[in-house]
Image (cartoon, helix red, strand yellow):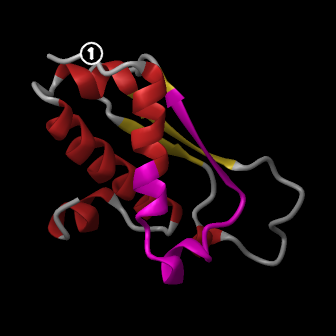
């Protein structure tokens, strides 16, 4: 286990978001990303809550932003080095953003995320 300070961890999440290709990033809409200390369930690294882009219709308006939570302590608990944390944060952010785009867990696993 490694304990990456919250400020550094938040920067890793921001870097992972900045690493999303602009061609995809421009389609992210009405979504907020948060770093949370603890997951509501053991072993949960991240969580997407909201209405995926593929499910939004003409009646989608005036809703609160979707929420992506990235869980600092859970990720740190499964990593031994900061390099592992960097990789896991990137993978987790991409996985949760994939849910925002309407990609399910099975397909994300098939794609290696």
| Residue 13 seen in the current view | yes
| In the image, farthest residue toward the bottom | 23
Magenta stretch containing residue 43, yes or no?
no
User: Along the horizontal axis of the image, is 39 left or right of 51?
Assistant: left
Question: Which residue is tagged 1?
Answer: 3
Q: Determine the residue positioned at 69% across, 71% down.
A: 56
Up the image or down, 61 lies above or below 1; here it is below
**Image coordinates for residue 22, horizontal then vertical, percent:** 52, 78
Q: In which quarter of the image is the C terminus?
A: bottom left
Range of the magenta residues? 15-35
Q: Determine the residue positioned at 43% across, 67% down.
A: 20
Up the image or down, 61 lies above or below 57; here it is above
Camera-nearest residue between 52 and 82: 82
User: Along the horizontal axis of the image, is 10 left or right of 82?
Assistant: right
Secondary-structure class at tag 1: loop
Camera-nearest residue between 66 and 2: 2
Camera-nearest residue between 93 and 103: 93
**Image coordinates for residue 59, horizontal then vertical, percent:** 84, 70
**Image coordinates for residue 28, horizontal then vertical, percent:** 61, 68
């Amino acid at each position: 286990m490694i304990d990456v300070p919250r400020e550094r961890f938040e920067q890793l999440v921001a870097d992972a978001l900045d690493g999303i290709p602009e061609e995809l990033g421009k389609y992210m809409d009405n979504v907020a990303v948060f770093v949370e200390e603890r997951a509501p369930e053991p072993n949960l690294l991240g969580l997407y809550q909201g209405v995926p882009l593929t499910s939004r219709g003409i009646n989608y308006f005036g809703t609160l932003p979707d929420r992506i939570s990235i869980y600092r302590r859970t990720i740190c608990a499964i990593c031994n080095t900061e390099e592992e944390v960097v990789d896991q944060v990137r993978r987790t952010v991409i996985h949760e953003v994939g849910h925002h785009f309407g990609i399910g867990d099975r397909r994300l696993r098939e794609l290696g995320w």
